[in-house]
Structures are given as structure tokens and as C-alpha cells.
Image (cartoon, rainbow, N blue to C red):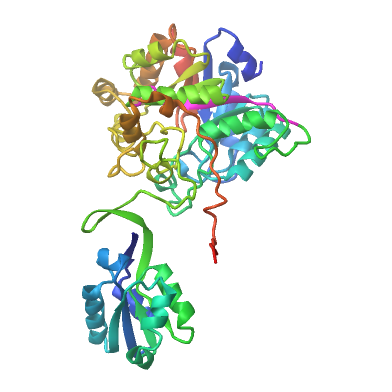
Amino acid sequence: MIITKRKELNKILEQLKDKRRVFVVGCAACATKCATGGEEQVKVLAGELVKQQKQVTGTLVLDTPCDMRIVKKDLINNDKARQADSLVLLSCGAGVQSIAQVCEDMELIPALDTLFLGTIERLGNFNQYCSLCGDCIIDETGGLCPVTRCAKALINGPCGGAMDGKCEVNSDLDCVWVLIYEKLKKNPAKIKKYRKIKSNASSSGPQRIKNR
Amino acid sequence: MSFKEVLKTKKFIITAELFPPKGTNVQPLLRKAQLLKSCVDAFNVTDNQRAVMRLGSLAICCLLKEQGCEPIMQVTCRDRNRIALESDLLSANALGLENVLVLSGDHPQQGDHKEAKPVYDLDPVQLLKTARVLETGVDMVGKKLDGAPHFCLGAVVNPLADPLDLQLAMMEKKIAAGAEFFQTQPIFDSKPLKTFSAKTRSLKTKILIGVFLLKSAQAAIFMKEKLGLNISQDCIERLSRAANPLAEGIAIASELISRMKPQVDGVHLMALGLEEHILEILNKVK
């Protein structure tokens, strides 16, 4: 899931300085799960904007704003959206840009910052376990990704700075190499194996897949 | 004698760490090097130590070499991608530098440019291996080099890391990748070193144990609490009782070296700006 964070209201208002009529768009997928762009958060932001003397022409939570087909089907011809001079978007960067590509003539104001691909632990607790490197090696590391979960992305072993099993860079986080070690204790050959230099070719953007 | 040759002898090896200035005034560092030159086998020059931006290691190593000192260039994986790392290794060698200590490098968040992009394109094991590949006359993608470098390669190990077996597995990987010597994080008590020494005795490498000059009880408490270094209460009490804490720090360091001397290959001295006192530490070693 894509983890997002609401921008501060003053940052959003800065972008809306010369605008009066706004339409607020949310996301029923990741941003809803994240509680940053669901029905509830769309309503809250709309209320905040009304208090700031903005006219909210309407709101809409799109199924998946990152899917251009959905934007074409549900947003582009929405009359209330058309009446606004800007769309305020509570979705990740992929959603904002899919809307931008479909609704070319509309002014877009992103109201979220996109943080990472996250795993949900419980409501409001998200962890970055995968960094989309395009070359997965976690079969060798006990299902734990050192590329993402080691602050220095060390894939051959730890740096030596961990204290009480915690990362020297962020003591809130476990040293992933200590976790990998615990998991692979019975299989020391995996710990000792040299892991070759990873290719960055597949994770260096911009990427495009065109199968049809 | 080159450091590579020193490593082949049975002598007790002494290295000292110098850190480049933040700025271009290199004179104080060079003066310290001149003062210590006769009593150390080589000088490590740090690479933006603790992720604090400073003058580069390569430049200082060249200046030291010109002055007849034996430098060890520290290279971290933090700031350069594979292209820059390979290129810098070639540059260093072309300028007459052969000794390289490879390390991951403190994370930018621990330094003074906290918003910098961390690179870590290679890890230390991979960088050691890459240096060995360059020696064969090709780069890491197999392209032929016009002139191959040669290196004396070192790496780091934390003798007090927990779990130790994981740290040792990492050390063995570094040896297999080409590390000829190791320098360690500072230790302040020889007792916890016993397990590490026993477990590394059979490894074919030289290990120089890190020794740090503590200048005051406050500094010791800071390093214990902020950097997680294993400094004993006894040590802190000695420093706080002393009329001259720096002299006490010098005594603590030299006593530690005297105790370790019969059992270890050598020591690596760190004095964080007080390098001139390294001479006094060494003079007191029995």
C-alpha cells in the first residue's frame, strides 16, 4: 500500500491563494486505508476550506485515482468538478498524475505527500519493508529485506553499529541483520554467502511497462 | 617500510587516525603528522567522518605522502556510487596511494548534512571485492583498464558487536573479499576482548584494536550515552577524580595498550583533535 501524509493546511492554502471554487477528490484505495484521503478526510478538508472562505463545489472519492480509466469514467465529466477552478487531491503522487494526464485543463492542488510503499501493522502504524528495487533477494535473507530495512542497505551483513538489537541510525527500529541472523541461525550458510552487487538498472526511473 | 610490508612483519603495529579540517587549512593536521611520523606505522585519514562534511581523504593522503608519511585512505560507501568509487580508487593509486580502508560510513542522519541522499550503492564487502577486481586489469563490468592499480586493503570490525558470531561472519566475508587487515571500533577495557580474540585467532589477517584518548569524564559520558561505546564506570570515575583529566586519559589509554600488547597484532589510535598527545600515550606503554 502507498503511504501518504496530509500536507499542513497552510501549505494547501498557499497553493490555493488565488483560487476560490474548489472540488475535493479522495481515494478509496490506499489513501482510505491510510486515513489520509477517504470519505472522512475529504469531508474534514472540505470543512477546513469552507472556513477559509473557499467555495467547495463538491467532493468525490474515486475508487482508484491512479487508474486513468477510473478518472475518465468518474471524474472528467463531473459537473461539480467542472464548476471549480481547482481540484484539491487527497491521493498519492501516482493518483495526482493520472488525474493530471486525464484532466489536462484543470488546476490541480496535491494535498498529500507520498511517503513509501508500506505494510500495515495496525491502523496508523505503517512500516517500509519493500523499496521496489526490482531485484528481490529475500529468499536468501529469511523473508526480511536488508535493502530496505537496513539504513545503509547493506546486503552482505551488518555495519557493527547496532545497540541492543536496534539500528544505530534510528533506535526505534530493529537492526534487520539481527532479525535475519535470528531467523537463519539454523542455516548459517545463507548468512555466510557472498551477495553480489545488485543491479540498479530496473529501479532507476522513469520506468514503463508496455505489454500491449 | 610500506604498510603492506609492515603487515608481513611480526612487529606490534601502530596506526593513528587524523581527520581532515572543515575548510582548507591543512597545516595543523600536517604538523601533527610530522610530530607523530616516527612512532606510527601509518596514518588513517577519515572520509567525512560521522557524516560531517570535511576536506577529502584523498587530498590529505597525497599531502601526507609528499611529507614522507604512510597514509591509509578511508573510503566509505555513503557518498559515492560504484562509478565514483572505482574512479576514486584508480585516482588514489595513480597518485601513489596504495592503502585503503573500506567502511560503510556513518549515515547522513548522524552528521551535519542530515538531508543528504545516502548512496550505499555498494557495501563494504562488495567494495573490497571491486578493488581486487580492478587489480586484475578490468573494472567491475569487465571493461579493460589501461594500467591496473594495486592495493593494500583493510576493513573494520566491531569486537564488541552483539551478536558476535554475525559480526565474525561479516569479517570472514571481508577477508574472502580481499581485506588484509582490520581496524576496530575503540574499546576501553581489554576483558571483553577475550572472546573476540579467541574466535579470531585462526583468521589469516592482522587486527589493530581501536584505542581512544578520553579527555574528560564529560567526553566519556557523552560517548557512552550518545555513541553507545562500552566505557566502564571505573574509567569515568578515574577521569572525574583526576586533577588533570587529560593526563589521566593518556594514562588509561597507555595502560590499555600495555595490557593488550602481548595478545594483539597492534593498535589503532584515535584522539579526535588531540593527536599530539598520542606521543605521550605511546611513551608510557610498557
* Magenta-drawn stretch contains A201: no
Residue at the (48%, 36%) spot, across then down: B104
Residue B186 in sight here: no
Residue at the (23%, 75%) spot, across then down: A39
| Left or right position of B244 against B137 | left
Residue A84: name its quadrant.
bottom left
Front-lying residue, B31 or B231: B231
| Left or right position of B262 against B36 | left
* Magenta-drawn stretch contains B160: yes
Residue B152 placement (x, y as % from top left): 62, 23
Residue A192 placement (x, y as % from top left): 45, 26
Residue at the (68%, 24%) spot, across then down: B68
Against A204, residue B69 (above or below) is: above
Front-lying residue, A162 or B68: A162
Residue B184: name its quadrant.
top left
Residue extending farthest to the right is B146
Residue at the (69%, 28%) spot, across then down: B135
Residue A100 placement (x, y as % from top left): 46, 78
Residue B248 placement (x, y as % from top left): 34, 20
Against B25, residue A18 (above or below) is: below
Magenta stretch? B148-161
Q: How many marks?
A: 0
- Is the N terminus of chain B in the top left, top right, bottom left or bottom right quadrant? top right
Residue A14 in sight here: yes
Front-lying residue, B242 or B19: B19
